Amino acid sequence: MRITAVTCVKNEGPFLLDWVAYNRLLGVTDFLIYSNDCSDGTDALLDALAPWGVVHLPNPAKGRNYQMEALKHAQKHEVVRQADWVWVADVDEFLNIHAGDHTIPALIAACGNPQAISVSFQFFANDGVERFEDRPVLEQFSRSHNPDLWCAESAIEVKTLVRNDFPLHYFGAHRPFHRVTEGGEPPRWTDGSGRPVPQKFLVAANTRRIRKFPAAGARRHATLNHYALRSLDSYLVKNDRGDVNREGRAFDDTYWRERNDPAFEDRSIQRHLPALEATLQEMKAGPLGALHDESVRRHRAKRDDLLAQPAYAEMRAHLRALPALPPGELELMRELGMAS
């Protein structure tokens, strides 16, 4: 089975080997990775990953919507057209498969071999981790919100595996969009439990539910672990970098607070740690090791440069002082007399 992962990156050098190695353990055979104006050695690292199934291209986007223009380009690329399945995800997103041997083929079989599988996000908290460490993120972060409820929402965003016979109109970042033909059968599309996705999501009838649906009961076979915050150090670098997918979008403390809810512990993905660490050791034994170390050095140097700026020093202090509660919860607790 050929499975192609597609993503866009900007200054993700310290995290690339981790993500590529992990996805290869799941059964991903090929990667199509678009880079945007990197300054931390990401480009050189991607080029050197060719023996590990990585095709690296500069993002062809001419406008501001980098990700959607890259996905439009990817749709015509040979490594996508020849794939049995396509997985569109970001480098801070790790597919956590609970079915069978915990691989993508096992997930597909558990869901009944549909034409698409949409897996619900689970946002992992920073949980007080301040310093960047050159270790797998799935080892460092193990706490998240209640997987059935994020902030005040029962509907949580998804990412989607797409089979090559899906009636594709175009790829979206969270789900594909299909051609609608009169009298034609809709694609067979399930959630992470193998259940048909909700009808309004399927036909994109509700703009509020185009890329999400209720997570309760939807994660029997798989969850999508999203390490959006990582360490406080890395979050500051991410804030400086901006959004890889859209120009001019900044991350304020709302983004941080929404994702820094450590109420629930989930270490299930750590079942992969021994195999992941062995693969990383193999990868770093060659030229990739020096390139990875250089990206790590530049990541730390960027953090130091940022912290020398009063605005970033203030931002770091502000984020450290925030309660580990989603927006609105502390205010509600105060209203109920449960907090001062």
Image (cartoon, rainbow, N blue to C red):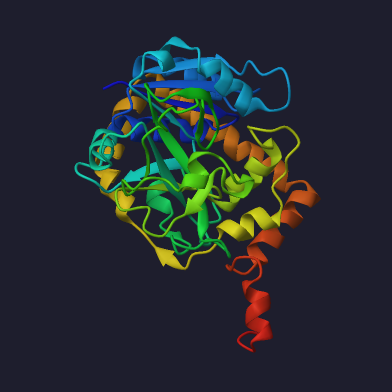
Name the residue located 52 percent from the left edge and 34 percent from the top edge: 296
Give residue 333's position: percent from left, percent from top: 62, 81
Residue lying at the far left in this picture: please name it: 100
Q: In this orientation, does residue 45 appear?
A: no
Q: Nearer the viewer, residue 39 or 141?
A: 141
Q: Nearer the viewer, residue 52 or 146?
A: 146
Quadrant in the picture for residue 21: top left
Q: Is residue 236 above or below residue 263?
A: above
The image shows residue 3 at horizontal and vertical percentages of: 34, 24
The tally of labels here is 0
Residue at the image position 69 percent from the left and 47 percent from the top: 251
Along the horizontal axis of the image, is 52 left or right of 128? Answer: left
Instruction: Tell me if 260 is positioned left or right of 5 in this view.
Output: right
Q: Residue at x 70, y 40 (%)?
A: 240
Image quarter in which the C terminus is found: bottom right
Which quadrant holds the N terminus?
top left
- Image point 56% across, 61% down: which residue? 153
Q: Can residue 254 be seen in this snapshot?
A: yes
Q: In the image, is residue 87 above or below residue 340?
A: above
Could you tell me residue 83's position as x and y percent? 36, 18
Of 248 and 85, nearer the camera is: 85
Up/down of 124 relative to 324, above or below: above
Residue sitting farthest toward the bottom: 337
Residue at the front extreme of this rendering = 183
Which percent across, then down, holds residue 237?
64, 41
Left or right: 199 as drawn, with respect to 111: right
Q: Is residue 305 positioned above or below 115 on the image?
A: below
